[in-house]
Amino acid sequence: MNPLDANRSGEHRVTILAFDGIVADTIPLRATALAEAITLECTLLEIEVCAHDMLPLLHALMPGRTFSEALRVAIEQLPVLQHERFRHDVTVHDLTALRAQRAWSAMASHGVPLRDGVLSWLQAAMARGLRMVLRSDSQRREVEPMLRLAALEDSMLFLRCADDPPRVAGASMLQASYAAIDARLDRQRLPRTQRVAVEADSKTADFALGFAETSRITL
């Protein structure tokens, strides 16, 4: 169901939007940052890898994950990363994620294009009274400047980023983010039956169903 149609019938009042992959084209850039960081660390360890060969898997792993979380899954799924000098060295993992984060922050500082049609969609949705919550896998310092450049900063009910507190011990970034969004919307008397989530892939969309009436992967 289109959220605008749902809003007209009074069913949905809030859309939770994934910034990464739905609003902005960040996922390929984040995957590239991680691939290049892995390649550099492996080169230092004299492990031969190819950044290009890793990109398809890393692209699929990025939605709903931090760099550290995506790296942990990649290590289990990419045989080349199961080399003993890489797989079991937590310090190397931390350095790799930090390199990726710094590279992505540098990319984001130059601006990231919004997805085709997203501005017109947002304008039409807000004109019909639909409220927006933005959920991002990126850090606040990366997202807020992009929102300002696109004149979207004041259009959102609120923004939830990967590095925002509270972080729940043992919970993934996606779990912590949706728990915080859920609690905040509950306080604003916007229950799950009045929410729709739009996520970048089926995995995160399925997870969002625990916090919204419906979810999907396209605007």
Image: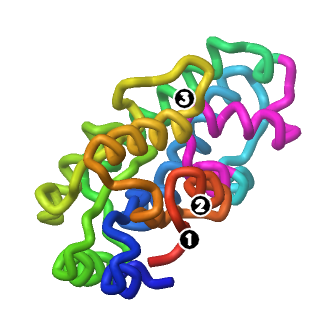
State the residue at coordinates (62%, 52%).
Answer: 207
**Residue 188 at what x, y percent from top left?**
26, 47
Disc marking residue 113: none
Q: CA distance from mark 3 to mark 2?
A: 25 Å
From the viewer's perspective, is the residue at label 1 or at label 3 nearer? 1
Does any portion of residue 46 appear in the rendered image?
Answer: yes
Q: CA distance from mark 1 to mark 3?
A: 29 Å
Q: Left or right: 161 with respect to 86?
A: left
State the residue at coordinates (28%, 47%).
Answer: 159
Evaluate if marks 1 and 2 touch, with contact meaning CB atoms under 8 Å apart: yes
- In the depicted view, which residue is nearer to us: 173 or 11? 11
Question: What amino acid type should be assigned to the residue bearing mark 2?
Answer: Ala
Question: What amino acid type should be assigned to the residue bearing mark 1?
Answer: Arg
**Residue 162 at what x, y percent from top left?**
42, 37
Whichever of labels 1 and 3 marks the residue nearer the N terminus, that label is 3
- In the depicted view, which residue is nearer to us: 163 or 3? 3
Whichever of labels 1 and 2 marks the residue nearer the N terminus, that label is 2
Residue under pointer 1 = 216
Residue under pointer 3 = 97
Query: Which segment is the magenta one?
Result: 58-84
Residue under pointer 2 = 205
From the viewer's perspective, is the residue at label 3 or at label 2 nearer? 2
